[in-house]
Image (cartoon, grey):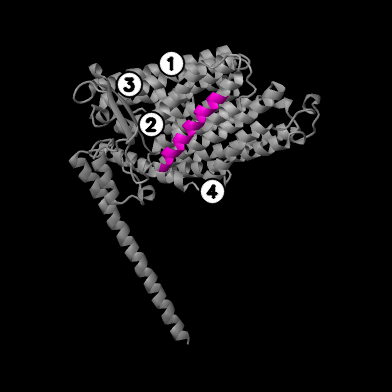
Amino acid sequence: MTLFADTASWPLLSFIVFFPLVGAIVVAFAPRSRSETARTIGLVFTGVTFGLTIYLMIVFATNHGGFQWVESRSWIPAINVHYQLAVDGFSLFMVALTGFLFPLMLIGSRHITKRVKHFTIWLLILEGTQMGVFLATDLFMFFVFWELTLVPIYFLIAYWGGENRRNAARKFFIYTVFGSAFLLAAIVGAGVLSEGGISFDYENIFNTEYSMAAERLLFWGFTIAFLFKVPIVPLHTWLPDAHTAAPTAGSADLAGVLLKIGAYGLLQFSLPLFPRAAVEAVPILLTLAVIGIVYTALVAIRQKDAKRLIAYTSISHLGFIIMGIFAITSTGIEGGVMQMLNHGIVTAGLFFLIGFFYDRRHTHKISEFGGIKAVMPKYAAFFMVFMLASMGVPGLNSFVGEMLTLFGTFVVHRWWAIVAVTGIVLVAIYMLWLYQRMFNGPLDNPKNMSLKDLRPHEVFVMVPMVVVMLFLGIYPKPVLDRIGPTADRLVVTIEAKTADTPQQYIEPAETASGRDVAFVADVLRLIDADDAKSRAVLERYQERERIEALAQTAGDSDGHDHDHDHDHGEGNGE
């Protein structure tokens, strides 16, 4: 029994990765003069890809903490590189989110009338490479897809963006390539130092015990690269410029998918591969996360450009994701992954809405709005829903993710969670103020008096997103059922790998109460943990179960005695 025991019966994951890339080739042969043909082909290929991701969610086993649908073939034997794809509870919903958003990006980009064919090709390439990032489990292959994602988003910003698009595209590229240098060095180091010779295989590196000095270097190499991509303060300065200049589809992808690659990397690589260094780094990363939550929320309040304000909102919300991940509790990690999904939908939706206004007025300036609810009531209603979701109002998706991350952090790192709550207060302040300035008050700008409300294709973009937000806010169980076993696996992995070391980590009972000894034993076999460390972890859980059983017995006894006394008292009264 290993992490990669579930071999695929057919190459579903390869279809998900390469179908959009095949679509890009088909679009390349479409007549340049017929732009709608290119767009239609793009919709067909992104739509089928989304259908495949829905199928993957349905067949995904909810009782399995390891990787599923594993595809593995030798690729470059000289350096032991494999073509290896697999999915777990962390990557599943990132793949689903990517599949969900790309058809909407194409539908929401009908205002693009120049170089439609090239625009569609770059979007399809972007979807395929981002799918590859979330599904690749050979580190060399992961890096290839990681780098390839930079190219299409660069061209989307540089050629179809707004004012100052070339500078924003260059800044984005330089920052992310600089971060990639750390990642490449760390991947090479991990592969060269792995047990049994050079290997970039995830499971081989997972089972390698590095020296503490090497583990620290490797952890920070991976983590710095991922933090550039998230991005986290103080590595965030490229993002507001990129968002402001990007076309609507580009901003939706940046917020919805691209930034999640960094958070996903922390979950899938930094924490499980280098757990001792990760446990050491928790105070630093929690501090950076909380600073990001509060600082960027304060900066957002001062913004005069609506798109730039949403960009800073995005960074603030990403701080909650990082906080949940580095709480290293099952609840916090589940909340972090849930919030990755929520953030991708809510923030992408806000960028779609800002983009729809830009199509009409060619401005993002908040002062250019004012009272437009009178002429765009449907637009105002949709914006209200997404604003409330961004604020974490109960009944909408973000509430669930934020509460899980806060609770999962509070039980182990109380003061960080308390400070982070101020971010929720601040988001209410700047989002409500933004709505007031955009939609309320008199309609006194002559240019706005003839504005048309949302067109049918724009409503078609927004409705599915609202439906998903409501579903996740009211009934998140199907998502949490699929994330939970993988989150538990990660926490037990960290407990096992840090057992009997100075970096020993033990999850508090408050967030591990649903994890029984039998499940822990299965995970330890799954990760092929060292016997001594396995015994240490199992003994802790057995002792915890014994204490909980005694507490339950005592509680039942107290309840019985109380009932007996109550009955006795009634008898005396009679």
What's the mark number on residue 177?
1
Q: Amino acid at mark 3?
A: Phe
Q: Say if 34 sits above or below 278 in the image.
A: above
Furthest residue in direction bottom, as rendered: 574
Q: Nearer the viewer, mark 2 or mark 4?
A: 2
Do the numbered discs 2 and 3 sit on residues whose CB atoms are within 8 Å? no
Q: SS for tag 1?
A: helix
Left/right placement of residue 290 relative to residue 284 reads right
Whole-number angstrom distance, CA of label 1 to CA of label 4 = 40 Å
Residue drawn at the location 55% of the way across and 38% of the way down: 422
Whole-number angstrom distance, CA of label 1 to CA of label 3 = 16 Å
Left/right placement of residue 207 relative to residue 180 reads left
Specify few, some or many for label 2: CA neighbours under 10 Å numbering under 14, 14-19, or 20 or more. Answer: many
Q: Amino acid at mark 4?
A: Ile
Please check the rendered image and state whether residue 234 is part of the magenta-colored stretch, yes or no.
Answer: no
Whole-number angstrom distance, CA of label 2 to CA of label 3 = 18 Å
Q: Position of residue 86 (x, y in %)?
A: 34, 32
Q: Would you name the residue on which mark 4 appears? A: 474
Q: In terms of sequence position, does the residue under pointer 4 or pointer 3 come before the other?
A: 3
Q: Nearer the viewer, mark 2 or mark 3?
A: 2
Q: Nearer the viewer, mark 2 or mark 1?
A: 2
Q: Which residues are magenta?
A: 40-58
Q: Position of residue 41 (x, y in %)?
A: 54, 24
What's the mark number on residue 13?
2
